[in-house]
Image (cartoon, helix red, strand yellow):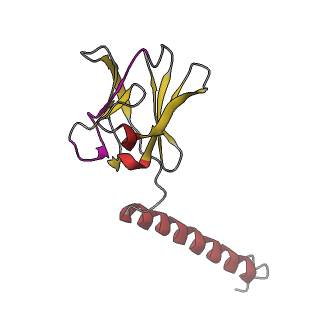
Amino acid sequence: MRFKNKEAVSPVIGVILMVAITVLLAAVVYIWVIGLIGGGVKGSPTTSYTLTTAANGDNRVILSGVSEKKSVKGYTYLIEDSNGVVVSGLTGTVDEIYSKRVNGITFCDNDADGMLTTADFFDIDPSAVGPGYHLKLQYVSGDISLDAALF
């Protein structure tokens, strides 16, 4: 028996489909392998905080949930008012306020390892910073990793 009407995929379309499937599989394998070896783009470290009042009356911002242990030299801090305006004189690098008070702000390294980690804290003199102000930490990349609304 002979078929007169042969319906099949043309060789050109067949090759295009095979190439497309191969590229798709290669992309899936690539993404899977990158995930296994821990590659990919990493963002800025992130952290959460708790606000309390220190024994001396300072506003205390206690860090918690720090996503990555990083050197304090990689962080800058700034204080913004409720309108998002940076308060003059209340900016700098965290290592400048490491265990010493500068313009009413102190960074206390709880485990004295030079790294910003969970349980470290900032003490902020309430007379230097009023209610509604924000302490912001920025990592070297410029991304904000902490935005703590002060009392």
User: Is 88 situated left or right of 117 in this image?
Assistant: right
Quadrant in the picture for the C terminus = top left
Give the x, y percent position of residue 101: 35, 30
Q: In which image quadrant can residue 32 be found?
A: bottom left
Task: Name the residue at 48% across, 63% down.
Answer: 31
- Residue 125 in the magenta stretch? The answer is yes
Q: In this view of the protein, which residue sits in the foreground, 57 or 20?
A: 57
User: Is 75 situated left or right of 80 in this image?
Assistant: left
Q: In this view of the protein, which residue sits in the foreground, 74 or 44?
A: 74
Give the x, y percent position of residue 57: 31, 13
Task: Name the residue at 38% across, 19% down.
Answer: 125
The span picked out in magenta is 112-127
The outermost residue toward the right is 4
Whether residue 10 is visible, yes or no, is: no
Magenta region, main secondary structure: loop
User: Is 147 situated left or right of 105 in this image?
Assistant: right
Give the x, y percent position of residue 44: 46, 47
Give the x, y percent position of residue 105: 39, 28
